[in-house]
Image: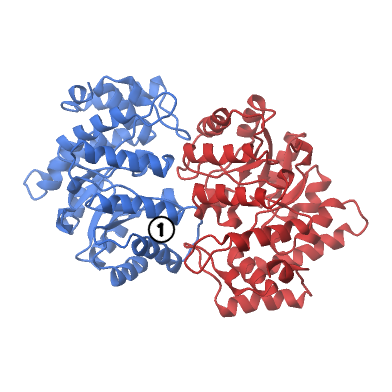
Chain colours: A blue, B red
């Protein structure tokens, strides 16, 4: 089983392909995941950018099983287990533990807003106790602008005090460097992943272990490279290159823009489909994101072959 | 099968009891639902105040089956089918259609924020097309302060144009009378339910068909009575009495306060349990809400016998 110190580097919240009738496309999924891994990234499958909260529990568990069957090692897997209902979180977390995944990326229950730290502690504790496995490792997921439910420093402290061997890290997708820095300062041995490569270099210099970023669906190699070689002399230049790619994507709705980019560089228009409530980019949008990335000499090495 | 004109009066987003280990308590659930129906209300089971988004799909379908087995007529049932993932919404909606429920109360997918009306239209359309039954009737559910995903007048107009026989109404829990009034004015034959009895009398005078309110868990008889007799001379006084009860509940976290009230008047402390991420009221809180309601000579007629 992967050790907690394997929890580092780049993890990609990998996109989920759908057929035209919105079914999960298993074949395209496995091919794409293998390509991402070949570029040096792990798979934070079932993250926000995976449209994972638009997938049923059964769909997510089936996809995780497929990745394992495809030979992707558990040290490369950080499946999300976000769910509003505890029974759903139990099932998803148990699946991650069963496969001895590096960790599971766990949203708080996100329907009810304004809930207390005590309530969130009980929710996380209930999942950990219910799974009851030393193979479960939880990476918390702080993305308040989407979930509506922040994870406070106080909650992290409570969880670490009670479950020091299980609650091992956090993805901070707040986009608020001050918050990421506060987590890094408060919990020195905690595995902190900024939720975008924007803070990759600043993060590594302050004790982060890597990052988990949507853009890693299209730019995994260069992000993974900087995560590994952040102490190199050209790190600032490398960070600036990453930032340029990200800036293009964030001009658009990110998930449809990433899928349009995969479709273009993979030579497979089917990749553009998103599941409702999302909507794919229109032709002008897709041409816009692709064209601007072309202007940066952006490439996705080997993608077309990998998806063929 | 109930006709669309049966969709009127009071529906209660009925509370869901849990055991100490957070399992759904089937026996207490059925007894409580029968009491609510005996007071003249229908059951908007699996609403926000039902902690329904803390229940798995399977738990909700099992509870709906239990209510039908218990002899509660379909005209009394408006089960919620809120889900982030389309496959989950398919299953919940199909269950409502199978039981020929008066309607199903349908949240938009609520994880992704800032989604377009086109995306929400596709989500609702996908569910309606997938169920593919003339027995499906959808009541939209607008509660933007919790879901984070509003339902616009434009979206309603699109849905009514495409699915006039299926999309039959809306629960407006925004607490914004101007929004409720705009819906009533824009869509005359649409079944509009204000999401609290606060707007019951104003609503009925402007074309609403009833209301769906959390407080109907503890005060169903008087609310149902005003919904039926809103043209009576004493309607204003009756509305003022309802408002006093509601004002006590909303001083506290509503779901725990309602459960504490049921526990007290039903003589069954087990009713106080909530599922995480919610937290029950502490002793002082529970005594506070119960004491303030006692000060209003508040009663829940027959509850203790019904729960025994």
Depth check, front residue: B113 or A4: A4
Q: Residue at x 21, y 28 (%)?
A: A296
User: In the rendered view of the protein, which quadrant contains the N terminus of chain A?
Assistant: bottom left
Above or below, comparing residue B126 to residue A147 in the picture? above
Where is residue B299? Give x, y as percent: 77, 71
User: In the rendered view of the protein, which quadrant contains the C terminus of chain A?
Assistant: top left
Determine whether, in the image, residue A229 is placed left or right of residue B161: left
Depth check, front residue: A190 or A59: A59
Q: Residue at x 39, y 21 (%)?
A: A284
Mark 1: few, some, or many residues within 10 Å (few <14, many ≥20)? many
Q: Is residue A152 visible?
A: no
Determine whether, in the image, residue B93 is placed left or right of residue A57: right
Q: Which chain is disc 1 placed on?
A: A
Above or below, comparing residue A160 to residue A5 in the picture? below
Where is residue B300? Give x, y as percent: 75, 68
Q: Within the image, what quadrant is residue B209 found in?
A: top right
Above or below, comparing residue B205 to residue A124 in the picture? above
Determine whether the residue tagged by mark 1 lies in a helix, strand or loop. Answer: loop
Q: Residue furthest front?
A: B69
Where is residue B84? Give x, y as percent: 48, 43
Above or below, comparing residue A41 to residue A264 in the picture? below
Q: Residue furthest left?
A: A233
Determine whether, in the image, residue B145 is placed left or right of residue A295: right
Where is residue B6? Give x, y as percent: 78, 41
Q: Within the image, what quadrant is residue B28 found in?
A: bottom right
Count how many numbered circles sit on residues in the image. Answer: 1
Q: Is residue B97 visible?
A: yes
Depth check, front residue: B64 or A292: B64
Determine whether, in the image, residue B34 is placed left or right of residue B234: left
**Circle 1 residue:** A150
């Amino acid at each position: 089983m992967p050790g907690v110190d394997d929890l580092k580097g780049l993890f990609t919240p990998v996109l989920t392909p759908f057929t035209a009738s919105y079914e999960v496309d298993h074949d395209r999924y496995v091919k794409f995941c293998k390509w991402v891994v070949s570029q040096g990234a792990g798979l934070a499958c079932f993250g926000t950018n995976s449209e994972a909260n638009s997938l049923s529990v059964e769909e997510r568990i089936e996809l995780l099983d497929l990745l394992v069957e495809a030979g992707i090692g558990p040290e490369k897997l950080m499946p999300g287990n976000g769910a509003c209902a505890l029974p759903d979180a139990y099932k998803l977390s148990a699946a991650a533990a069963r496969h001895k995944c590096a960790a599971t990326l766990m949203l708080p229950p996100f329907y009810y807003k304004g809930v207390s730290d005590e309530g969130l502690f009980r929710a996380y504790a209930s999942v950990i106790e219910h799974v009851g496995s030393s193979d479960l490792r939880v990476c918390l997921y702080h993305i308040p602008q989407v979930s509506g439910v922040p994870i406070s420093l106080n909650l992290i402290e409570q969880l670490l005090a009670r479950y020091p061997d299980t609650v091992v890290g956090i993805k901070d997708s707040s986009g608020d460097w001050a918050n990421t820095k506060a987590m890094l300062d408060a919990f020195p041995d905690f595995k902190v992943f900024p939720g975008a490569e924007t803070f990759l270099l600043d993060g590594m210099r302050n004790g982060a272990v890597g990052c988990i970023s949507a853009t890693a669906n299209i730019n995994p190699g260069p992000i993974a490279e900087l995560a590994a070689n952040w102490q190199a002399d050209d790190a600032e230049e490398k960070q600036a290159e990453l930032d340029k790619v990200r800036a293009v994507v964030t001009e658009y709705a990110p998930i449809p823009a990433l899928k349009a980019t995969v479709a273009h560089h993979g030579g497979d228009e089917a990749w553009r489909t998103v599941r409702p409530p999302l909507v794919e980019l229109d032709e002008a949008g897709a041409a816009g994101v692709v064209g601007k990335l072309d202007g940066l000499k952006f490439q996705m090495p080997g993608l077309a072959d990998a998806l063929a």
